[in-house]
């Protein structure tokens, strides 16, 4: 089950990343209508995908945990990226690139 959780979390993170138009992770993390919509569509899509591709019925609890783990990991990654862009350690790179 632990391997399944990691696999489903990764799959859902990829699906969230591929949404068009891109989602606003700040709003999603705080809770929004967009979060509700993504939750409904992607959790159903995940259950359907796992059933058709692997013949595995995912429990609602596993899919729920995987979805919110995926959102949290993408949000944290986005925060780290934003911090690193405004960090003194990257100033020398910006100088080299003339940004």
Image: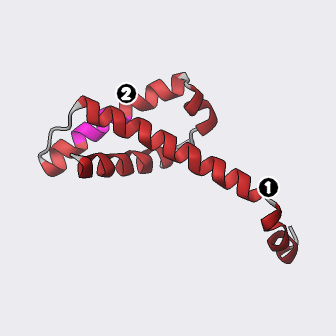
In the image, is 85 to the left or to the right of 38? right
What residue occupies the far bottom of the structure in this picture?
Answer: 96
Which residue does the image show at 15% across and 38% down from the upper left?
57
Above or below, comparing residue 98 to residue 1 in the picture: below
List x then y, in percent, for residue 92: 84, 73
Which residue does the image show at 29% across and 33% down from the upper left?
44
For the image, the number of numbered tags is 2
- For the stretch drawn in magenta, the main secondary structure is helix
Q: Nearer the viewer, mark 2 or mark 1?
A: 1
Q: Which colour scheme is used?
A: secondary structure
Above or below, comparing residue 1 to residue 65 in the picture: below
Circle 2 sits in a helix, a strand or a loop, which is it? Answer: helix
In the image, is 76 to the left or to the right of 6? right
What residue occupies the far top of the structure in this picture?
Answer: 33
Residue 19 visible from this viewpoint: no
Q: Disc number at residue 71?
A: none
Residue 59 visible from this viewpoint: yes
Quadrant in which residue 95 is drawn: bottom right
What segment carries the magenta color? 42-48
List x then y, in percent, for residue 75: 57, 43
Work out how far the residue at label 2 is from the one at label 1, CA to CA, in angstroms: 35 Å
Residue occupied by mark 1: 86
Q: Which of 49 and 32 is in front in this view?
A: 32
């Amino acid at each position: 089950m632990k391997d399944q959780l990691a696999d489903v979390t990764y799959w859902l993170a990829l699906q969230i990343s591929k949404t068009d138009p891109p989602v606003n992770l700040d709003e999603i993390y705080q809770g929004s209508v967009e979060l509700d919509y993504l939750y409904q569509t992607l959790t159903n899509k995940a259950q359907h995908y796992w059933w058709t591709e692997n013949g595995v019925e995912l429990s609602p609890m596993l899919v729920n945990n995987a979805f919110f783990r995926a959102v949290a990991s993408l949000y944290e990654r986005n925060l780290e990226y934003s911090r690193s862009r405004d960090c003194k350690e990257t100033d020398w790179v910006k100088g080299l690139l003339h940004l």
